[in-house]
C-alpha cells in the first residue's frame, strides 16, 4: 500500500508540474536570435531574456501609449482606408526593437530574410527592409514583453509578441494603428495576411509567444558558429526543477 501510495503521489506531482509548466510556459520570457548563411550554416547565435533587454537595449513604448492592429473587414471596402472598422487595442506596451536584437548577431542586410518562430512552431517571415527601413505607416517592428494591464511576461501571456508601432495618419482618433490599408501600402503583396483567404488583417501578422528570431543571410559559410551571450534559464525550467524537488520530498514522507 505504501509503495502504491508513493507512486500515486509522485505521478500526481509530475502531472501538476506538466500542467503548470504548460500553462505559464505559453508566454516566452527569453528570445534566441540566430544568423545563418544561405546554405544553412550557423554564423552566430545569442539568447537574452526580457529583463536583460529592458536594462541594456532601447525600450520601444512607454507603457502608456496603446498600439492597435486591425481584424477583417467583412462589409464595404475590405481595405478600410479610414481605419475605422474592427480596430483591435493590443494594449499599452513596452518592448524591444527587432532591429536591435538582430544587430546582436551581426545584423541583417538587404536581401536577407528574418523569420519569427513561436513556441508552438508557428512561423512568419519578413524581408529585411521591414525591420531596418520601415515606412512610417508601419512603424517600428518590435517584440513586446510588457502590457500595462497584465504586467511583464509570463503574466502578459501573449508575449513576447510581434508588434508594430504604426502611425496616426489615417484614423480620426489619432491612434497608433497598423491597419490593413497600411499593410497594403507598406508591404509586398505576397506578405499580406488574409483571414479565410479573403479578408486582409494585420492581427494575423502579430505572432505571439515568439521564442526565436532567425536571420537567413546571403553571407557564404566561411565563419564558424559563435555564441555571444546566454542568459538565465527559462521560467519553465525553473518550475520543473522545483517540481522535481517537491516530488522527492513527497517520496521521503511516505
Image (spheres, grey):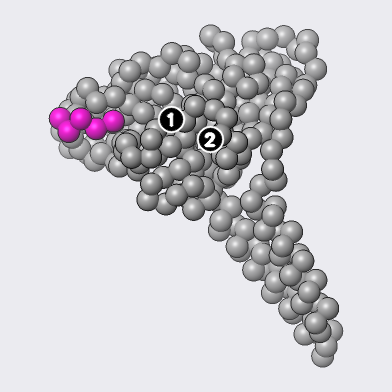
Relative vertical location of residue 251 with respect to residue 166 in this rendering, above or below = below
Q: Nearer the viewer, residue 153 or 194?
A: 153
Q: Going 24% across and 26% down the picture, which residue do you hit?
A: 168
Say whether residue 222 is magenta. no
Q: Which residues are magenta?
A: 172-176
Estimate the x, y position of residue 250 in percent, counting from the top left: 77, 77
Relative vertical location of residue 242 with respect to residue 70 in this rendering, above or below = below
Q: In the rendering, which numbered label is found on residue 60?
A: 1
Q: Main secondary structure of the magenta part?
A: loop
Estimate the x, y position of residue 165 in percent, counting from the top left: 36, 28
Q: Quadrant of residue 20?
A: bottom right
Relative vertical location of residue 91 with respect to residue 109 in this rendering, above or below = below
Estimate the x, y position of residue 140 in percent, counting from the top left: 41, 24
CA distance separating discs 1 and 2: 9 Å
Residue at the far bottom in the pictured view: 1
Q: Is residue 66 left or right of residue 241?
A: left
Q: Going 69% across and 54% down the picture, which residue do you hit?
A: 238
Residue wearing tag 2: 54
Residue neighbourhood size for the residue with mark 2, other residues' Cα within 10 Å, grouped as few (<14), some (14–19), many (≥20): some
**Label 2 SS:** helix
Q: Nearer the viewer, residue 204 or 197?
A: 204
Q: Going 38% across and 35% down the picture, which residue do you hit?
A: 62
Say whether residue 173 is magenta. yes
Amino acid at each position: 500500500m505504501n509503495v502504491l501510495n508513493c507512486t500515486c503521489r509522485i505521478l500526481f506531482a509530475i502531472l501538476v508540474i506538466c500542467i503548470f509548466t504548460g500553462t505559464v510556459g505559453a508566454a516566452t520570457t527569453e528570445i534566441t536570435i540566430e544568423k545563418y548563411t544561405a546554405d544553412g550554416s550557423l554564423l552566430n547565435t545569442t539568447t537574452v531574456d526580457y529583463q536583460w533587454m529592458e536594462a541594456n537595449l532601447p525600450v520601444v513604448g512607454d507603457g502608456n501609449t496603446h498600439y492597435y492592429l486591425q481584424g477583417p473587414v467583412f462589409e464595404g471596402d475590405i481595405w478600410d482606408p479610414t481605419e475605422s472598422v474592427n480596430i483591435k487595442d493590443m494594449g499599452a506596451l513596452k518592448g524591444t526593437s527587432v532591429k536591435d536584437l538582430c544587430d546582436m548577431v551581426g545584423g541583417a542586410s538587404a536581401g536577407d530574410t528574418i523569420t519569427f518562430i513561436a513556441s508552438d512552431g508557428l512561423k512568419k517571415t519578413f524581408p529585411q527592409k521591414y525591420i531596418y527601413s520601415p515606412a512610417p505607416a508601419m512603424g517600428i517592428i518590435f517584440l513586446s514583453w510588457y502590457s500595462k494591464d497584465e504586467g511583464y511576461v509570463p503574466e502578459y501571456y501573449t508575449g513576447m509578441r510581434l508588434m508594430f508601432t504604426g502611425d496616426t495618419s489615417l484614423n480620426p482618433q489619432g491612434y497608433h494603428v497598423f491597419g490593413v490599408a497600411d499593410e497594403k501600402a507598406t508591404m509586398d503583396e505576397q506578405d499580406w495576411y488574409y483571414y479565410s483567404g479573403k479578408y486582409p488583417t494585420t492581427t494575423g501578422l502579430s505572432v505571439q509567444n515568439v521564442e526565436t528570431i532567425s536571420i537567413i543571410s546571403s553571407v557564404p559559410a566561411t565563419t564558424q558558429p559563435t555564441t555571444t551571450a546566454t542568459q538565465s534559464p527559462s521560467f519553465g525550467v525553473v518550475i520543473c526543477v522545483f517540481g522535481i524537488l517537491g516530488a522527492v520530498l513527497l517520496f521521503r514522507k511516505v
